Amino acid sequence: MWEELFQKVKTRLDIEDTSEGKAKKISIPSDLLFKCPRCQQVALMEEFTAGGKVCKSCGYHARLSARERLELTVDNETFKEYDTLMKSRNPIDFPGYEEKVKELQKKTGLSDAVVTGECEIMGEQCVVAVMDSRFMMASMGSVVGEKITRAFERATEKRLPVVIFTSSGGARMQEGILSLMQMAKTSGACARHSDAGLLYITVLTDPTTGGVTASFAMLGDIIIAEPKVLVGFAGRRVIEGTIKQRLPDDFQSAEFLMEHGFVDMIVERREMRRTLADLIRLHGAGKAGGFDE
Amino acid sequence: MSKLTAWERMELIRQKERPTVRDYIPVVFDEFFEMHGDRLYGDDHAIVGGIGVLDGTPVTVIGQLKGKTIEENKHANFAMAHPEGYRKALRLMRQAEKFHRPVLCFIDTPGAFCGVEAEERGQGEAIAKNLFELMRLKTPVISVVLGEGGSGGALGLGVCDRLAMLENAVYSVISPRGCASILWKDASKEKEAANVLKITAEDLQEFGVCDDILAEPTGGAHKQPELMAQTLRDYLIHTVGVLRDWDEQELLDARYHKFRKIGEFSEE
């Protein structure tokens, strides 16, 4: 524990301070700074947070916790959370899994990697799911699969649109084959929601990969991405290992996906709420019964 | 039933004499007409597809193809499909639905291909679309894991009414090698990882994923390929016969619930 504390003090970032005309190096503890993983530029954490966690230099939209995302997206006091008590088991007795989950529950206050519920976005009613990458890279095991499935099922029953903010490292290895089957389960629930003529919007956030990309993330009627986020099927390092060369920086970026035809629109964070509300409204979807009422 | 460990089974199914879908087709089906291409981009040699005749009944056949020689493997990309492979499969599935033919999928892949072009052409979208469409395909679907069931690449042909596995086949969310490198930062511990991941036919039957296990000849399918093919044929004739009698909606509901009930969690 003490080691960790010291570790934190030791990791400092050196930045160039040019404010007084001549460059001099100053050293600031790294938790007061944000270093953009895309453009490597450094900003003060305070400014970065105040700006909605968007990199000022390149526009990269950094990761948000599920709570932060909900605060930015849903109307005040309209969020009714589903399945708050659902927790994972250790179905294949994977070494260290239970401890890891307990530790993350304590650290994040989440029960698992997705928060689901009903809400209003600028008055438009919908079912929403937000994945949180702090929890085992938001990998999909039984809990994520079940919560997403129930979200689709409830939305189908109540004839509501579904909005999912995806982010995930893929299927959760620690639950073995059960995790893989969640891809089929969520896609099936999504298909039933679709067959009922209901709207599903995917918002791809950083990073969306693996089994989540290869299931509900790519099944939206409308697929939106935040700028500069990473979206792909295979991990970058896996591909670099296969082809034995470095990939271009924009590989698997939101912009790359749009260029190849897999994303409808790239929407900045500050415009997201308005855009979602407008799209739901255009489908007459956010009021029970749609245009008929 | 097999007494082999998960790792021993992996070694067995990796032997190059292990029969592939190409070996089974001529014995299982009375006739076979191979079909090519996804009508969008190209023809993926990692996936074989076409129309077969199973004991007098026309069926759609889709299988991942492993090679036995380096040349064959290069041609079929070691059974690792690109997006066009999954889209070729989907095209043939929809054709099967139109003509009320059951779909028979043969799974045998280390996984979907991980490469630049696969990403550019939407590997994730291609697999996702197959899961989505298979879930509502209005004709019976039977999948059989012949050897290796590698993750999402296998599942792209694995949303079905009945999943069977050959006795020594394995089916896993991640390659044991990948698991070992994440868990112990050491890919060479794949043997240990294989045994941790619970990937054998019996394991999968316990989890309600695998419905039927098809016994292999003593020593493995490669010892008596003809006998293995005969077992496969008998199983498919029987299962197609059972599923053909189902009402369409009943079939779709049962397929949904087969996957719907998979998962372990608590709600206290």
Image (cartoon, coloured by chain):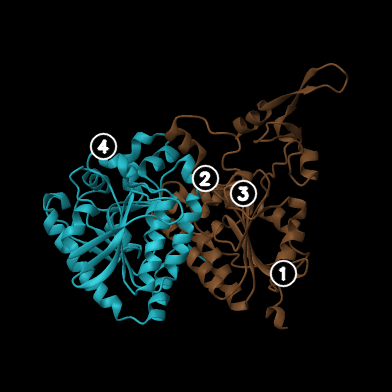
Chain colours: A brown, B cyan
Query: Tag 1, which secondary structure?
Result: helix
**Residue under pointer 4:** B70
| Residue A105 position within the rendered picture, expressed as x and y whole percent measured from the top left | 58, 52
Pick the front one: A18 or B203: A18
Callout 3 touching callout 1 (CB < 8 Å): no
**Residue A282 image label:** 1
Pick the front one: B177 or B46: B46
Callout 4 touching callout 2 (CB < 8 Å): no
Cα–Cα span, label 4 and label 2 = 27 Å
Q: Residue at x 72, y 69 (%)?
A: A282
Q: Earlier in the sequence, mark 3 or mark 1?
A: 3
Question: Which amino acid lies under the numbered mark 3 shown in the image of this protein?
Answer: Met
**Residue A258 image label:** 3
Tell me if A257 is positioned left or right of B196 in this view.
right
Cα–Cα span, label 3 and label 1 = 22 Å
| Residue A32 position within the rendered picture, expressed as x and y whole percent measured from the top left | 75, 34
Q: Are marks 4 and 2 on the same chain?
A: yes
Question: Which amino acid lies under the numbered mark 1 shown in the image of this protein?
Answer: Leu
Which corner quadrant holds the C terminus of chain A? bottom right
Above or below: residue B59 compared with residue B117: below
Cα–Cα span, label 3 and label 4 = 37 Å
